[in-house]
Each structure stands twice: as structure tokens, then as C-alpha cells.
Amino acid sequence: MSSGGKLPTLTTARQAHSLSNEEAARALPVHLRGVVTYFDPDFGTGHAAIFIHDATGSIFVSQASKPAAQLFAGALVDVRGVSSPGGIVGNPQIHILGRAPLPLIAPRVSLAHLKTGAEDAQWVEVEGSVHDIVEFGHGVLLRLEMSDGPIMVLMMKTPGAAYSQLVDSVVRIRGNAAPSINSDGQIIDVHLQAPNLSSLQVVEPAPGDPFARPIVPIDKLLTREYYSTSIHRIHLRGHVTLQWPGSLVCIRDGERGICAETRETIPAAVGDLVDVAGFVETDDHIPVIANAVFRSIGNNRRVAPQSVTADKVLDGGFGSELIQVDGLLVGYDLASSDAILQLSSGDTLFPAILPKSLAGSQVRAWKVGSRLRVTGISLVSVDIQNNVHAGLAAPKSFRILMRSPADVTLLERPSWWTPAHALILLGLALACTLGVLVWVVILRKRVQAQSVELRKSEQRFRHLAQHDSLTGLASRLILEDRLKDTIDSISRNKNGLAMLMVDLDRFKEINDTFGHQCGDEVLRVTARRLLDAVRTSDTVVRLGGDEFVVLLSEIRDARAAELVASTVVSSLSRPVHFADKEVPVTVSVGVETAFASEMDIEALMRHADAALYRAKNSGRNCFQVFAAGRIESLQEKDQGKNDAGAVVPKA
């Protein structure tokens, strides 16, 4: 192209999309005519998402201001704008000329091919089984299991459509390939943006009865007979061993147990015989049934737990089984949505978990130092790196899922023997007789030694209860105390506080790709970067897994919290070095600010969590602010020149 004089006008989508970033940065004039293949008037930030297709291909059009409401998929439009880095059209002026059919030709592509970026923004077709559907606002998110892996498909909602009937059907969907891009311009994932149900074709309808398929024995799942995860739901039958309504149901069929993730709230008693239909997946290398439905078929019978030690659980063979295990209570966490008891048995630490909705007030009755017997479902995590025995992955930790407070039995209360009681006994001994003075001296030394040991034990238990052993960050217990102190302070000073919910993006993929040792290093580095990104007076807490909370005190302007969130996203979205590799890392952040006149801690945490969920759906590697029922991303607004993939909602 000429470097001087009048800039040439680009008249096709292929010409504009194929420019290098250096060429596109020259803001070359673009004049296109084509059909709208995807239109979302508002991604949640006031920005629109638009794909235009002409005879040469497709391109994304970035419109910072909200477009006219009459724009729609299938509109024939005239577009004038300028080229922008990333192969997009910026500063567009769009005029509707009429209607046109959506493109008739769409090449069938695989997930592997899409991940190469070769089909960036192009109109393509994918085929797979619908495993999950999430409806939100004016959009629908489908999780499609293709032959070579899962892909997320975002489409605009058709009013009145029964999307739930698509689960377990095989479909073909046409839409624009939309990769997600990090701040370095690298493709980190890919998904599809489809206009609406008109671009979806059902190839194989879902069975009318999800339980019609033959029953599969649980002990056959992920073995040589059923190694691959089926693209269709499978049918299992067993007796209920645990139910968390709306979240989880676990069953056992006489040979082995398994847990199923479900949104159903139908009550099922322990021992009920049920049918379960869902998709086979693995979570932290634990077999699970995802997006499951179940029905009761009666035949209630008692399901007895197996009594085992912590060491025996780690020897293997007890995954998803109902067990009973003894341990010393070293701490508990009541700040999250679940009540978590931290127990110790020998050199093994393990949590026992019960949803607060089922826990009641009895949890607080158990004192640190008590010896307890807990009953529940054991979920065993494995160390996939230690395949030292002919490919056998070694268990590394486990957790217990309890059903009610009745699953905790108090075996022994904390020792009565304390330094104060020892001094009372010492005074009595001194008052008895001088004739036993030597014995008193010996007794005093023993008491002092035991007092030192008790103080060390108390300090150790307190530290375990208040700090995360991997990152050294504060625990939810400290977060609860800091919230109380901060509320008192802002009530006096008439200022506010902010809460940042921070979640690592695709942390499971990091574990799967680089191993759990790398995942642990990512968590440690993330903790250090979080501490460096905030003030020393702020509180950084690890909630568990890859979730963190930052509590900002003495906030006088909500803008300050947004600036901190922006700093957190940029500071944490840098590769982590591990074993001569650079591991890509990004985070999503939800922000909520509250002031003295509107302080509501439960609403603060709920709003921050909702903002985090929106950040995930907005493409990750960003933050979202909760404000008056509408979440706005300052980061996405500042990066208005990014391409389509930078702002696409994702699960």
C-alpha cells in the first residue's frame, strides 16, 4: 500500500480482516456492504457486538456507543469505518438497506482447527452434543461437546423457546468463530457466537425419557469398557448416600459410589433407590456426573458407612464412598457458604464440609481440640504427576461431604489440663506439707513443660485455622473479624469499604496441562502478586481453590476500588515461570463498594460474587463493577479497541 497521499479504501471483509496490526493501526478507510450474522446490542457495558459477512468472509465491527435498536441478524447493511488492530472495523457508521438471508455456506470445523485461529471471525459450522444450557438476560450459553472437546456457544435468546429440551441432543450450529485474546494478543480459547435458534439444526433429538438408555454399573465408568466420556447422558441406578438439594446427589449401586452435580431440588432420603442420568466428566481427576437429572423409584434401605482411617483413605479404594473417619478438630471456617471443619489425623489434614443451609447452629458447639468422628462421602484427589507405579496416580488428599450435623459425633472434649488449672494444683501442693518440697519442685517442672507444649499446640491450631497452608494468606475466619472491625471504623469515619472477588481463569486447565505442582506454584505467585498490588492495610484472603477476596478499607470514592481492580487484573495477568515454562495466567475480578449509610455485608459479598460471575461471562481477564443492578466493566471500556474475542462472555 502507498505510504503517502490519499489512503486506499478497503471494500471487502477479507481485505480489512487480513491486515497486520501495524497496517490496521493506520486507520485505513473501510466501506463494506454485507449481512449481519450476529448482533448483541449490549454486552453489559453499553458496547455492541456485531459481525458482518460479505462474499469474501466475515469481520467484527466494534461500536463503542449503543447502536440503533432496529439492527438485527439478517439485516443487509452498509458500513463505513476505519481499520483497527486485531482485524476489526472501528468507528462505524451503519445504515440498514433491507433484509438478506444468512450465509448458506459454512465450512464444518473441528475444535482443534478453531483453536489455531485460522477461522477468526469467520462464519463456520460445528456439530456436537448439548451438555448444558445457561440462560441469562437476553442471551443463552450452550456447552457443546464436540468429537475433540467442549466448546461454548453464545446466542441471542428467542422468546418462548424451550432451550432445556436441547440438552442431550446432537445439533449443528452456525456462527462466527470468536477467540478470546489476552493483553499480549495471544489466543487463549475459542468459542462460537450464533445469531439465534435459526442457526441451530437438530441432527438427533434428545431422548424423550433421559432414563431410557441401559443402566451402566458405576464400577465400569472410565474403565476399559467405558473409558471415553460419552457425548450422551448415561443411565445409572443406586441408593442415595448424600443429597445437597440443588447442588449434589451421591449414590451407590452395590459395588461403588459416585456423585452427580444437579440443579434439581427434589428431596431424596438417604437409602432411596434412584435413577440418575447425566454426562460423565472428571473434576480434579475425580469421576463425576455433570448436569444430571434423577428420579426416585422407591425401595428405601439403610446404607451403612465404612469405618476407616485417614491413611487408609489415601491408600485408595474409597472415592465417592460413604465412610466414617476420626480426627482432631484444629479449626473451622463459617464465613463461606459452607461450614468447613478442619480435622487432623496423624500427619494428614482434611476438611469436613456441610452447606450452611443444612448445618444449623450446632456447628459452633464443637470446640477446637475436640476429637470427632465424621460420616460422609469421601472425595479423593490424586497426584497425576506421581505415576510411579505403572501409571497409577497416587492419592494426595481428600475431603468429606457431610449430610447433616448428625454426621458429627463428639468422641472426646478438649483437655481440661491448662496452665491456670496447673497453678491451682500447685498452690494446693505447696499448702500440704514442706516434707514433699522435692516432689513439688519436680511437679512444677513437669507442669511448666506441659504448659509450654500446650501453648505451642494452641498457636499451631490457631495458625492452621487462620491461615492457608499453601499461600500463607489469611483464611475466611480472619476475613470475618476484619469485616467486623472495618464496619465499626467506617461507621465512625463515615467512609466506605470495597470487596474484590478474584478468581483465576481456567485454573483447572493449568492443572490438567502443567500438573498440580505447577497449579500450586501459580496459587503461591498469585497470592504474592495480590499482596503487592494492594496496601498493607488491606486484607487478602484465599477462600479456597482458585478463589481470593481483597477487602479494601477506608474507601472514600468508588473509583479507587476500580483502580485497584484494574491494577489487580494487570498485575496478575502475567505468565508464571515454572520448570522452564511460562504458564499463561489471567484473572477475573468482581467489585462492589459500600458506604456507611448502605452497609450490608451479605449484599456486599453477594454483589461482588455476581460481578465476578459477570466478569467470567464477559470474556475473563477483566473486572466488573456491581452498581444499581447493572455491572459495568471499566477495563473493557478503556480497551474499546480490542477485537471481538476480548469481550465475549464465557463460562
Image (cartoon, rainbow, N blue to C red):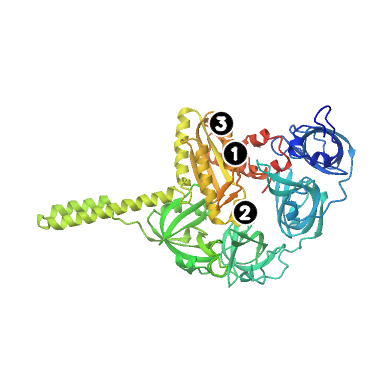
Residue 324 can be seen in this image: yes
Which of the two residues, 80 or 84, is positioned nearer the viewer here?
84
Q: Is residue 97 left or right of residue 608?
A: right
Which residue matches tag 3? 560
Instruction: Looking at the image, tell me whether mark 3 or mark 1 is earlier in sequence order.
Output: 3
| Distance from the alpha carbon under mark 1 to that under mark 2 | 21 Å
Within 10 angstroms of label 3, few (less than 14), some, or many (20 or more) residues? some
Which of the two residues, 213 or 101, is positioned nearer the viewer here?
101
Instruction: Looking at the image, tell me whether mark 3 or mark 2 is earlier in sequence order.
Output: 2
Question: The residue tagged with tag 2: helix, strand or loop?
Answer: helix
Report the amino acid beneath label 2. Glu
Q: Is residue 519 left or right of residue 482?
A: right
Which of the two residues, 311 or 92, is positioned nearer the viewer here?
92
Which residue matches tag 1? 570
Which residue matches tag 2? 509
| Distance from the alpha carbon under mark 3 to that under mark 1 | 16 Å
Q: Residue 44 in the image: x percent, y percent? A: 69, 38
Foreground label between 3 and 1: 1
Within 10 angstroms of label 1, few (less than 14), some, or many (20 or more) residues? some
Question: The residue tagged with tag 1: helix, strand or loop?
Answer: helix
Specify the farthest residue to the top: 5
Q: Residue 287 in the image: x percent, y percent? A: 61, 63
Q: Could you say which disc has been placed on residue 260 in the image?
A: none
Q: Residue 254 in the image: x percent, y percent? A: 58, 72
Specify the farthest residue to the front: 3
Quadrant of the image occupied by residue 84: top right
